[in-house]
Image (spheres, rainbow, N blue to C red):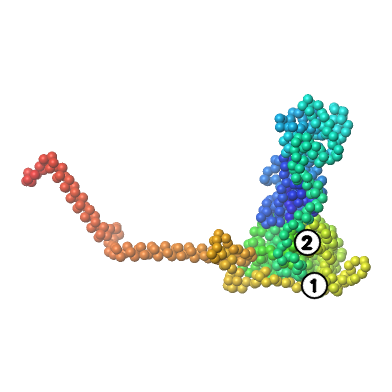
């Protein structure tokens, strides 16, 4: 399983799962490769279960693995040959699969032969060679080919073969026939066997493209085919509140809760981060109230919490006047394609904004350490940032931070230098947005006074740079209709609830519902409105039921106006009258029947009577 997230500035070319799938070719008999994007909120719980907190993370699961197994972390080099060798050895170590183990005699191969095999072969190789193992895995899905490997020491001793690697066909009479292979490569051996068995050499396109995948040359061309995002054709300079809040939203709801457990130094780092956010983030009042509540709650967590504890708690802390907008919208950090910029850009912008805010407030206060913001930032990158390589590189830079920062101005400039070093390292990288190239910031167009012209390269006037940074990161821009205003009393409901957003188009298909992206407050208001509607319907239904009951009682009182009152008597006059009439009718019928049948038998019941 490969975690191939998209929240890092630098993404090694060799790690995407589809590249892994290319060079494994037809190994799916024994190796299956899948990709899990832990930057997708839908995969958050799954990534937390399997303890995937950073990327690239590669884990292997053995055939007998259960759902409780978190997998074996691959911690070696992320180059394609190294990962391929790792998988080959994992298959070879599996006891239930003897397919990669060397045979000792030719008849060991013949025991495996079936009527479906048109070609039976053995490859002779040294003990350190992986050619035979990879060839067996390459051809495992070709039912007409049976190939096994034999070590050179055994071949010399038993069959006097002295050329390695070499390929031999096993005839029906158990004789070995050498096959001439001009180029001793994996692809050459594979093509020879496929040709002898009648397979098309281009039957498997993924294997033909494996060399292309190993170089990584095709990745950029594939990315360039993706459509440009609307409105991203020109750079947008400035610090936007939407970018800052989107970065905090992703941090709070994706990057932190993906951790299976948060304790010790990681918990302390999170407490320090929420402290500087609640103190120095220049957000709207309802966001600041929410950040303060999160920090106060977090300070009461003493030892341990899980990622799910975190997400449940920050949800419970949101109220009508203290919440974090529940949507991500990039403006200044919007890339030309979804792959580019976004969260990494917003995180840098957030950290610069916090450092400038701290500088403005504490530049004349010697009691506040100049690295008040930088230490929590460094710790957060170390324990929570999803890109392992980025985190490692930042820690290397911050290891000298305490000796390089002695004033509040040094704090702002240190983070600026660090950011420019990252831009220089990633310039021309596959992660670079071609519309927004990574250049030294600020550019000469943005700050002409910051640059010094010389023949050796870029030189800076750091006083001017400091003045520019303070001005740039203090001017927070707000795009219209991007951020909800501060809710005020009853007006908040009508302000944030757009009833038309969920209404079907007039005259159209009622199954098609027009929706818009809502933030947390709007969603809450929708839920409250829905609950009110349900309550009104229940009350109306109850009212109608009670009115029907009263109408029925009134009708009965008009039809039966006189009821006999008494502790035990429940019949009225009409009931008694009906009973008397029914009694007289039954008695008359009985008398009539009695005399009718008695007369037919000529019996006289009374001498006085004439019959």
Which numbered mark, 1 or 2, is in the foreground of this view?
A: 2
Residue 155 placement (x, y as % from top left): 85, 30
Residue 393 placement (x, y as % from top left): 82, 58
Q: Quarter of the image holding residue 504?
A: bottom right
Residue 392 placement (x, y as % from top left): 81, 56
Q: Secondary structure at mark 2?
A: loop
What's the mark number on residue 433? Answer: 2
Please give the name of the residue rendered at 21% of the width and 55% of the height, measured from the top-left corner. 581
Is 392 left, or right, of 545 in this rendering? Answer: right
Please tell me which residue lies in front, 51 or 105.
Answer: 105
Please tell me which residue lies in front, 519 or 32.
Answer: 32
Please give the name of the residue rendered at 32% of the width and 62% of the height, measured from the top-left corner. 556
Please give the name of the residue rendered at 84% of the width and 31% of the height, measured from the top-left corner. 178
| CA distance for labels 1 and 2 | 26 Å
Q: Which residue is denoted by mark 1 in the rendering?
A: 470
CA neighbours of label 1 inside 10 A, class few (<14), some (14 to 19), many (20+)? many
Residue 41 placement (x, y as % from top left): 67, 57
Is 605 left, or right, of 284 in this rendering? Answer: left
Q: Can residue 540 be seen by looking at this rendering?
A: yes
Against 563, residue 148 (above or below) is above
What's the mark number on residue 584? Answer: none
Against 360, residue 605 (above or below) is above
- Total labels: the figure holds 2
């Amino acid at each position: 399983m490969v975690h191939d997230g998209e929240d890092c500035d630098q993404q090694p070319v060799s790690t995407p799962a589809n590249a892994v799938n290319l060079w494994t070719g037809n190994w799916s008999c024994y190796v299956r490769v899948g990709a899990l994007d832990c930057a997708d909120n839908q995969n958050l719980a799954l990534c937390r279960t399997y303890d995937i907190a950073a990327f690239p993370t590669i884990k292997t699961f053995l055939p007998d693995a259960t759902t409780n197994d978190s997998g074996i972390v691959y911690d070696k080099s992320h180059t394609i040959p190294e990962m391929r060798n790792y998988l080959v050895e994992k298959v070879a170590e599996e006891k239930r699969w003897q397919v990669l183990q060397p045979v000792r005699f030719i008849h060991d191969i013949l025991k495996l032969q079936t009527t479906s095999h048109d070609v039976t072969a053995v490859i002779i190789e040294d003990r350190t060679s992986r050619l035979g193992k990879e060839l067996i895995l390459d051809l495992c899905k070709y039912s007409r080919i049976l190939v096994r490997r034999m070590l050179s020491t055994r071949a010399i001793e038993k069959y006097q073969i002295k050329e390695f690697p070499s390929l031999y066909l096993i005839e029906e009479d158990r004789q070995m026939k050498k096959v001439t292979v001009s180029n001793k490569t994996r692809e050459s051996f594979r093509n020879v066997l496929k040709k002898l068995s009648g397979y098309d050499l281009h039957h498997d396109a993924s294997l033909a493209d494996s060399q292309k995948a190993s170089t990584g040359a095709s990745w950029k061309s594939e990315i360039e085919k993706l459509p440009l995002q609307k409105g991203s054709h020109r750079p947008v300079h400035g610090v936007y509140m939407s970018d800052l809040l989107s970065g905090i939203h992703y941090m709070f709801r994706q990057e932190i809760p993906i951790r299976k457990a948060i304790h010790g130094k990681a918990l302390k780092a999170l407490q320090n981060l929420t402290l500087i956010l609640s103190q120095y983030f220049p957000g709207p009042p309802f966001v600041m109230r929410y950040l303060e509540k999160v920090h106060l709650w977090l300070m009461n967590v003493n030892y341990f919490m899980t990622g799910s504890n975190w997400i449940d708690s920050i949800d419970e802390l949101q109220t009508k006047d203290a919440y974090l907008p529940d949507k991500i919208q990039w403006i200044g950090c919007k890339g030309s394609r979804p792959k580019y910029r976004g969260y990494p850009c917003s995180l840098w912008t957030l950290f610069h904004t916090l450092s400038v805010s701290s500088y403005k407030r504490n530049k004349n206060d010697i009691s506040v350490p100049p690295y008040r913001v930088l230490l929590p930032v460094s710790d957060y990158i170390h324990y929570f940032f999803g890109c392992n390589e980025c985190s490692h590189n930042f820690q290397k830079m911050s290891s000298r931070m305490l000796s390089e920062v002695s004033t509040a101005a040094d704090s702002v400039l240190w983070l600026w230098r660090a950011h420019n070093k990252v831009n220089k390292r990633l310039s021309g990288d596959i992660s670079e947005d071609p519309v927004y190239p990574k250049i030294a910031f600020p550019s000469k167009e943005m700050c002409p006074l910051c640059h010094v012209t010389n023949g050796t390269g870029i030189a800076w006037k750091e006083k001017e740079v400091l003045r520019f940074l303070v001005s740039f990161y203090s001017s927070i821009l707000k795009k219209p209709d991007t951020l909800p205003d501060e809710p005020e009393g009853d007006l908040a409901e009508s302000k944030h609830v757009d009833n038309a957003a969920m209404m079907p188009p007039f005259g159209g298909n009622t199954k098609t519902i027009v929706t818009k992206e809502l933030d947390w407050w709007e969603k809450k208001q929708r839920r409250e409105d829905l609950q009110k509607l349900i309550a009104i319907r229940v009350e109306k239904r109850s009212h109608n039921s009670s009115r029907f009951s009263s109408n029925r009682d009134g009708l009965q009182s008009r039809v039966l106006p006189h009821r006999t009152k008494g502790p035990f008597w429940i019949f009225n006059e009409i009931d008694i009258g009906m009973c008397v009439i029914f009694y007289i009718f039954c008695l008359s019928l009985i008398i009539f029947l009695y005399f009718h049948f008695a007369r037919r038998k000529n019996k006289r019941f009374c001498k006085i009577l004439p019959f």
